[in-house]
């Protein structure tokens, strides 16, 4: 029996040894990088053993300080998923902070050369002749300095019912580049759904912002005291992000306005904060369009003619949403700064298109209607009817398999956009007009070419000069008859009438 006992013991020891060996090969927790001062962490294998996770936020040594150059991991994470990463050297010390997943951090870190090009810059500076008296007062020297002086195109002002904002100081034409802004903070959109405790979210967001360089953090903190409700002293970072929901999908590198569905199957959406853009007020019928470029900079362009003294506004949500949905969003995230009751139908939305006190709803470019002014309730009713017609025609124009849309309907579709003050949403409208004119295969192809060229101009304003929409419409404008859409729906009718079901040559 002794030999049997020894055999059983040896078998047990062998099983234990195999178990220990197999444990080494089991999947480990998701890697989180260890801090490396100034060292690029993008392609480096991270040390997994130095981070201990709990169900709540995990903080590293409170005395740890991020390096002034290169990517750095703070080892400050929540639920083993969302961690803080910094690169304080980008943009000559402007810096950027990420609160995201490790895989998304790697994708962003690979863009650091592009991110370094983003900057806060006013692009619409103009020059004016300087009088001798002004030249002497300003200390201008030389003939060129005396004759020309840069003039800022806007100034900070208080906007009624909205608070601090920007107003134009000079006339601005459509298509004029206005300014660009560099990102300071990126936060994964799922962070707000996955971390269900608001206190934990606030704790991690505050820690992330604390790593920003002093000048960038000062600019960021100015946003805390804007858009306050009457009973509020300071906004949280979460409120700041949700009130200005600039969004980027790292899978597509394109902006998707709130309310519009992304066509990307992979989800890598992030909120991006641009402190220098915080003074743009919201309007559902804005005069400024914007897009996010390859450097993740936000670029603004004038969407329609702006007069001196006019408020500069952008649409923080999809302006084609129904008015009720727009009102609810504005009331929740960008409420009126006035504590007094509002006479408007929606006491929580100061936007002119929600109150019915908007002259641009009667005639484009903000000019009042010359003969038959409407009451606010009539304005709102007319606006809702226009928007409903616009959506109905839009669905027809988007449907490649629908019957051919007549030219009168295409022209009416464009007219609705202008009457509704949607100059910031003309790129798709002109593209649909050009394509549907081309579907008809008319002998006179001037309309298709005209709207393809207008689509190029509008897409440059709304998406940037290198956008796919610009390239596609430029190709069409160059050869409308050689485009795939030429006579598309006419060929379909002929094919249906053909005895053999084939299109004629």
Image (tube, rainbow, N blue to C red):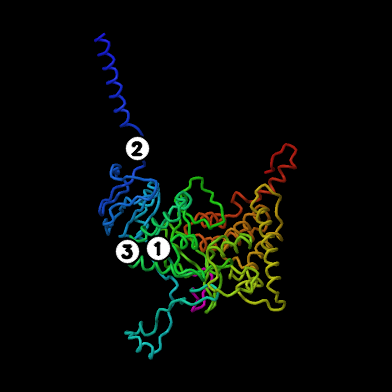
Q: Percent from the top left, x then y, of residue 329?
A: 57, 61
Which comes before the other along the chain, label 3 or label 2? 2
Task: Specify whether 107 is left or right of 48.
Answer: right
Q: Is residue 168 above or below residue 76?
A: below
State the SS at label 2. Answer: loop
Extent of the magenta region: 165-176
On the image, which quarter does residue 365 sit in? bottom right
Give the spatial CA distance, label 3 vs label 2: 34 Å
Could you classify mark 1 by the number of other residues whose Cα lies within 10 Å: few (under 14), some (14-19), or many (20 or more)? many
Residue at the (70%, 76%) spot, across then down:
373
Determine which of the numbered discs, if any, sits on residue 121 in the image: none
Give the spatial CA distance, label 1 vs label 2: 37 Å
Q: Is residue 351 above or below residue 205?
A: below
Which comes before the other along the chain, label 1 or label 2? 2
Q: Which residue is mark 1?
A: 182
Q: Which residue is mark 3?
A: 213
Q: Percent from the top left, x then y, of residue 121?
A: 40, 69
Q: Is residue 305 above or below residue 291?
A: below
Residue at the (65%, 69%) spot, across then down:
345
Q: Residue furthest top?
A: 1
Which comes before the other along the chain, label 1 or label 3? 1
State the SS at label 3. Answer: loop
Viewer-closest of 487 and 135: 135
State the SS at label 1. Answer: loop
Q: Which residue is mark 2?
A: 28
Could you classify mark 2 by the number of other residues whose Cα lies within 10 Å: few (under 14), some (14-19), or many (20 or more)? few
């Amino acid at each position: 029996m002794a030999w049997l006992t020894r055999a059983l013991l040896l078998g047990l020891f062998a099983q234990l040894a195999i178990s220990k060996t197999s444990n080494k090969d089991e999947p480990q927790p998701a890697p989180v990088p260890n801090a490396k001062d100034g060292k690029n962490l993008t392609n480096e294998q991270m040390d997994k053993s130095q981070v201990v996770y709990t169900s709540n936020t995990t903080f590293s040594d409170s005395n740890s300080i991020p390096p002034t150059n290169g990517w750095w991991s703070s080892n400050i994470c929540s639920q083993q998923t969302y961690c803080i990463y910094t690169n304080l050297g980008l943009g000559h010390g402007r810096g950027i902070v990420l609160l995201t997943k490790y895989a998304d951090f790697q994708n962003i870190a690979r863009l650091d050369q592009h991110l370094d090009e983003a900057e806060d810059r006013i692009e619409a500076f103009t020059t004016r002749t300087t009088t001798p008296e002004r030249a002497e007062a300003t200390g201008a020297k030389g003939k060129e300095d005396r004759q020309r002086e840069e003039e800022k195109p806007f100034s900070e002002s208080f906007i009624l019912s909205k608070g601090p904002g920007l107003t134009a100081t000079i006339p601005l034409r459509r298509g004029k580049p206005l300014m660009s802004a560099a990102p300071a903070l990126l936060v994964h959109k799922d962070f707000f759904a996955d971390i269900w405790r608001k206190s934990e979210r606030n704790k991690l967001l505050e820690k992330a912002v604390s790593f920003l360089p002093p000048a960038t953090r000062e600019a960021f903190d100015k946003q805390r005291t804007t858009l306050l409700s009457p009973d509020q002293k300071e906004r949280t970072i979460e409120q700041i992000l949700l009130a200005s929901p600039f969004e980027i999908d790292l899978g597509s590198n394109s902006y998707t306005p709130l309310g519009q569905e992304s066509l990307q199957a992979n989800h890598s959406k992030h909120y991006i904060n641009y402190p220098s853009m915080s003074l743009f007020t919201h309007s559902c019928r804005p005069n400024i369009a914007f897009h996010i470029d390859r450097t993740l900079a936000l670029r603004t362009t004038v969407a329609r003619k702006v007069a001196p003294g006019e408020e500069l506004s952008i649409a923080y949500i999809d302006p084609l949403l129904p008015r009720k949905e727009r009102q609810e969003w504005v009331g929740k995230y960008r409420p009126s700064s006035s504590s007094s009751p509002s006479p408007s139908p929606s006491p929580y939305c100061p936007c002119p298109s929600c109150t019915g006190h908007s002259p641009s709803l009667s005639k484009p470019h903000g000019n009042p209607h010359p003969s038959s002014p409407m009451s606010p309730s009539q304005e709102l009713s007319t606006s809702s009817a226009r928007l409903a017609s616009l959506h109905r025609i839009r669905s027809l124009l988007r449907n490649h398999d629908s019957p051919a849309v007549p030219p009168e309907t295409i022209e009416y579709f464009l007219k609705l956009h202008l009457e509704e003050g949607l100059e910031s949403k003309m790129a798709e409208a002109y593209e649909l007009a050009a394509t549907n004119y081309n579907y008809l295969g008319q002998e006179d192809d001037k309309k298709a070419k005209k709207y393809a060229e207008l689509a190029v101009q509008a897409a440059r304003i709304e998406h940037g000069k290198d956008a796919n929409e610009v390239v596609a419409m430029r190709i069409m404008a160059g050869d409308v008859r050689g485009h795939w859409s030429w006579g598309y729906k006419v060929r379909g009718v002929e094919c249906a009438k053909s005895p053999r079901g084939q299109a004629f040559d």
